[in-house]
Image (cartoon, rainbow, N blue to C red):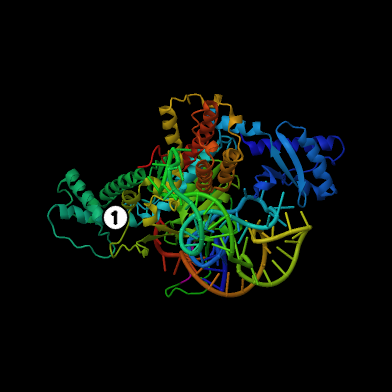
Amino acid sequence: MNLFSDIRALVIDCLDVLAAEGVLPDGLAYDNVTVEPPRDPAHGDMATNAAMVLAKPARMKPRDIADALAGKLGADARISSAEVAGPGFLNLRLAAGVWADVVRAALTDASYGTSDMGQGRKINVEYVSANPTGPLHVGHTRGAIFGDALASLLDYAGYDVTREYYINDGGGQVDVLARSVYLRYLEAHGQEVTFEDGTYPGDYLIAAGEALKDKVGDAYVGKDEDVWLAEVRSFATDAMMDLIREDLAALGIKMDVFFSEKSLYGTGRIEQAIDDLKSKDLIYWGTLKPPKGKMPEDWAPREQWLFKSTEFGDDEDRPVQKGDGAWTYFAPDIAYHYDKVTRGFDGLVDVFGADHTGYVKRMKAAVAALSEGRVPLDIKLAQIVRLFKNGQEFKMSKRAGTFITVRDLVDEVGKDVARFIMLTRKNDTPFDFDFDKAVEQSKDNPVFYVQYASARVHSVLRKAAEAGIDTSDPAAADLSLAAHEAELALAGKIAEWPRVVEVAARTHEPHRVALYLYDLASELHSLWNRGNDDASLRFLQEDNIPATQAKIALIRAANVVISHGLGILGVTPAKEMR
RNA sequence: GGACCGUUAGCUCAGCUGGAUAGAGCGCUGCCCUCCGAAGGCAGAGGCCAGAGGUUCGAAUCCUCUACGGUCCGCCA
């Protein structure tokens, strides 16, 4: 049940009737007709802009359309009043029974809030995709959490979602990794080693070096690189991916697919993707113009194979194969996305770090070319996170060893806090993460605030049980006994949930869910607090069991929505606060 | 030189497909605990939505230009 789309459907029906009666012209487009919650509650429960949007195409005054529409809408049992206001808004008030229906739907219909907007379409969300050269650090967290929540959100909205991680195991940095692990391996054999520039000195490779020793003994000691490099590379990337999988698990993330870049090499898959572009006449042999502005010192014109990405909105054509026959990094990316397209996805989402801003256009160009415009690719950027501790910015530096890992973050604040807080900001705005605030249990901390709302509902249920009140069948409660204006406000918030899901899913913006949950929690706390002044608003009315059951049904419905919402965000709801 | 993102209250940020008097939290001011959990509550002050043009019944929202901030720009992935 989605109250807003139900009422919008009603508005459209009424417009059709008016058209059939000749009041409105035939064939009007209703696309821009909206039914929304008004900003000001004094304007009623819902407002529609139908009269204003249709005034021009219908060549009528907004007021005349609004009056006619109000007459039709008023005849529906769900509408208690329809008033024309402002420049032509139609403000609707809904019958009390409608709110009761919403509460009952939230309580009894497990699919309340889910949507059929996805219609089972296959969508692939690729996120994290960190290089397999070490554990995840805080810089990866935002994209990881964002991508994961987006995937859950799309799933909730009726898409068939695949969560995917692209392992960059084909480039030079995994050779560096392999050499670094080899050094740790020698160390495990008791040798003194030095980590020069171009190797990774991090302690996290010690275990990998020892594991390699356990596996191959001294077989590689003193041997040339060509003997061991390929083997160690694969061993080391496997070890790092195990590490990364554990880090992801600590954040509550489980991927469906890990896709290896290496699997594209030597298997003809890159060639196949590039051939596809060639067959579309989108690859040519040529040189790029020198970059404008700052000129690299050693720049020289170079002939290479270029992809005509400018035909798809990019600023420059992009090299896919260098003059010496080596692929550029872009080539496997093309092949990977070609693979995604051929796997039959109806939509793709890539979550990139902000440092990959420059690759957005070329990637979109590639997918547009490969899929001939059939598969939309949305690229979401995870902006940087600044860390604050004791009121001061905490700068991460690999060299200085001040380097906060995902594990550090989870150990310090917990998975739930990390996830929720990261999701309270839009993905593409820079974000300050304050450790002190994150662990604080107060209203300043949005995670706590939402969790506390949930805990309070459980607390009421416990008290009700102690008082011997039967709350086993909340849907059977007579909800007309919880119809105070403050209680209806909470029901109204519950009614917005399906709409929030649809907007968030359509815009690929899971932060809307977090913000909504905060609002919903706020509404619940507010109702609770009003019980302090007005005893009739307390949830437990021991001398009036039916009213208690109705009030409990209401707050349980709110809690159902909180649970679903937190579920999308990957946060475990709290039953009590400690 | 160029691309992308941003600029909204003192601070951190929301703001839906363009919709009514622009919202929240913090901070500030004033009131309030014999009250289902004060881990607070209620109320109030605080805005030229960076600036200038344009589109229209209507613009924080769309378009153009400017300013400021961030990220990035062949031969690393």
Considering only vertical position in the picture, is A290 above or below A314? below
Q: Work out whether residue A129 can be spotted.
A: yes
Q: In the picture provided, is A218 more to the left or to the right than A236?
A: left
Q: Main secondary structure of the magenta part?
A: loop
Considering only vertical position in the picture, is A17 above or below A278? above
Quarter of the image with the C terminus of chain A is top left
Residue A254 percent coordinates (x, y): 39, 41
Q: Work out whether residue A110 can be spotted.
A: no
Considering only vertical position in the picture, is A155 above or below A420? above
Query: In the depicted view, which residue is nearer to us: A196 or B62?
Result: B62
Residue A323 percent coordinates (x, y): 44, 62
Chain ID, mark 1: A
User: Was residue A242 drawn as part of the magenta stretch in this picture?
Assistant: no
Residue A316, image quadrant: bottom right
Q: Amino acid at mark 1?
A: Leu
Residue depicted at x 70% and y 36%? A9
Q: In the picture provided, is A430 more to the left or to the right than A490?
A: left
Mark 1 residue crowding within 10 angstroms, few (<14) / some (14–19) / many (20+): many
Query: In the depicted view, which residue is nearer to us: B3 or A97?
Result: A97
Query: In the depicted view, which residue is nearer to us: B74 or A399?
Result: A399
Residue A245 percent coordinates (x, y): 34, 44
Quarter of the image with the N terminus of chain A is top right
Q: In the picture provided, is B48 more to the left or to the right than A179?
A: right
Q: Secondary structure at mark 1?
A: helix
Query: In the depicted view, which residue is nearer to us: A311 or A120?
Result: A120
Q: Which residue is mark 1?
A: A177
Residue depicted at x 55% and y 53%? A364
Residue at the farthest left position:
A190
Residue A555 percent coordinates (x, y): 51, 35
Highlighted range, magenta? A300-304
